[in-house]
Amino acid sequence: MKLLNLIATLDSQIPIAAVDVLSPYEATIIQWLTTEAKEKLDSPVFFWNLGVSSLEQCLIAEDGGLVFKPVPEYKRPPHADPILFVFDYINNFDGAAVFILGDIHLFLGRTRRSYPGKS
């Protein structure tokens, strides 16, 4: 999927879109998506990944930089499965939002595909 089509896809009420991003570009993509979602969809953007295992709202600072703000009501119990808990949170979220789930491929039983020039 081309990034330029991503906002149109989200605006069309398609609930899930997958974007495979190389690590060096992840912050740039999140920053772009946060800006676009706010301007075109008037929706907040949230980020979750396995390493952090908490939910953070993505915001754009006055200087244009990306800021991650913890979501205080996201309180995963220590025994809860992290992916099931975040999906449950999303399912029960009141309102429209964009949720970016990083490292989700680990839960899909597939290994990350290799990229040209990478071994």
Image: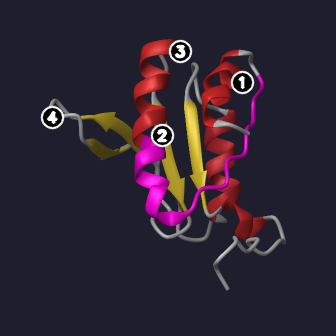
Q: Judging from the image, what secondary structure is the residue with disc 2 in?
A: strand
Return the disc, 1 or 3, that comes first in the chain's sequence: 1
Residue 50 on image: x %, y %: 56, 66
Q: Nearer the viewer, mark 1 or mark 2?
A: 1
- First-in-chain label (1 vs 4): 1
Q: Quadrant of residue 113?
A: bottom right
* Type of amino acid at the residue the image marks with label 2: Phe
Toward which corner of the image does residue 34 lie, by quadrant? top left
Q: Amino acid at mark 1?
A: Thr
**Relative to 101, 15 lies left or right:** right
Q: CA distance from mark 1 to mark 2?
A: 17 Å
Q: Residue at 52% across / 53% down in the picture?
A: 48
Which residue is the site of mark 1? 9
Q: Earlier in the sequence, mark 3 or mark 2?
A: 3
Of tags 3 and 2, the one toward the viewer is 3
The residue under label 2 is: 46
Q: Which residue type does callout 3 highlight?
A: Leu
Q: Dot 2: within a 10 Å radius of its alpha carbon, few (fewer than 14), some, or many (20 or more) residues?
A: many
- In terms of depth relative to the viewer, which is nearer, 6 or 47? 6
33 left or right, relative to 91: left
Residue wearing tag 3 = 41
Which quarter of the figure is the C terminus placed in?
Answer: bottom right
**Precedes in sequence: disc 3 or disc 4:** 3
Q: Residue furthest bottom?
A: 119
Residue 63 image label: 4
Give the mark, 4 or 2, whose residue is nearer the N terminus: 2
In front of the other: label 3 or label 4? 4
Q: Which residues are magenta?
A: 14-30
CA gap between label 4 and label 2 equals 20 Å
Q: Secondary structure at mark 1?
A: helix
